[in-house]
Image: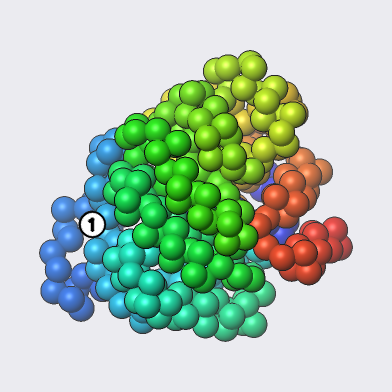
Amino acid sequence: MTVRDLPKVELHLHLEGAAPPALIRQLAFEKKIDLSRIFAEDGSYVFRDFQHFLQVYEAASSVLQTPEDFARLTRAILEHSAEQGVVYCESFLSPDFCGGGDVAAWREYLHAIQETASRAEAEFGITLRGIVTPVRHFGPEQAKRTALCAAETAGDWVVGLGMGGDETRGHQGDFAYAFDMAREAGLRLTTHAGEFGGPESVWEAIRDLNVERIGHGVRAIEDRALVAELVARQVTLEVCPGSNVALGLYPSLKDHPIQRLRDAGVRVTVSTDDPPFFHTTMQREYDMLHQTFGWQDSDFRALNQTAAEAAFCDADTKARILKLLETS
Ligand code: ADE
Ligand code: ZN
């Protein structure tokens, strides 16, 4: 059985990580860059483990070199996401890959992405907002430059700061300066935690960065007091089940803690993270959750309502999305 094609809200999607392999191959061809090592014979991305995934991700991103490249990327992603029934999406965008952390260059990339997004909104009915992303393994100093890009462009479109990258390096608190700068600029905050770092990383995220959402956060299930804290603080988890299984965090979806976190009262949402890397789509995630845990339309409706409530967009946009979910 296939879960009915409900309108979906996706809060955790990396723009570069959503790049169709065919587009990356085409850009590599145009720029005469040899990227054959990152592709399998069937044309999909290939990687061994999380560390290697990060390397392949950066290699793929290296052919995205101009605002025009990012415009092509944004259009391809939004067209595909709209086909999956996604009506509202928040995407991680990295100034490190868009001008190397320079504010003036970042503005040009952002302009191209935003223009493409408004055209796609008119054509496909999908709304995009941006979360600026420091890359953790680039270190705290680079994160400050990234946060400055975020602060300088904060507004109705750039709505948040959310750190990604290698969670096994350093501590969340090493990035407090960058997160404080973003908070001062009115941005909302999330960080990857409790994916390749254990529960302690989630404790650090809420204690030392004071984030209101967590990217993944699933390893909180290993600490009962932490689960209680997430419930008490009403922290929303951006859970990406297919990503967690593909990266080897859990052997299969039936071993994944999303059901147990939900049963404990944690606010969970569902996203795809880097869908072509993990051979997934929003519809596939929903179908798998239906098959594995028996989730029905009413469960998915509740899930999307939670996601819309936790969205970082302005109140008018949020009200419009909530209404759309209610009436379809
Ligand atoms: N960047 C892109 N995908 C990521 C993931 N799953 N974890 C950390 N950083 C990422
Ligand atoms: Zn992610």
Q: Amino acid at mark 1?
A: Ala
Residue drawn 38% across and 72% down?
A: 103
Residue 326 point in image, percent of width and height: 85, 58
Which corner quadrant holds the C terminus?
bottom right
Question: Ligand 1 near label 1 (Cβ, under 8 Å)?
Answer: no
Task: For mark 1, give the secondary structure.
Answer: helix
Which corner quadrant holds the N terminus?
top right
Q: Quadrant of residue 267?
A: top right
- Against 280, is 49 above or below? above
Report the front residue among 137 and 178.
178
Left or right: 34 in relation to 316 = left
Residue 306 point in image, percent of width and height: 74, 46
Kindly tell me whether residue 21 is visible in this rendering: no
Q: What residue is pinned by disc 1?
A: 59
Task: Identify the coloring.
Answer: rainbow
Report the front residue among 222 and 161.
161
Kindly tell me whether residue 306 is visible in this rendering: yes
- Crowd rating for badge 1 (residues with CA inside 10 Å; few <14, some 14–19, many 20+): some
Q: Quadrant of residue 172?
A: top left
Residue drawn 34% across and 33% down?
A: 170
Report the front residue among 189 and 111.
189
Left or right: 169 in relation to 266 = left
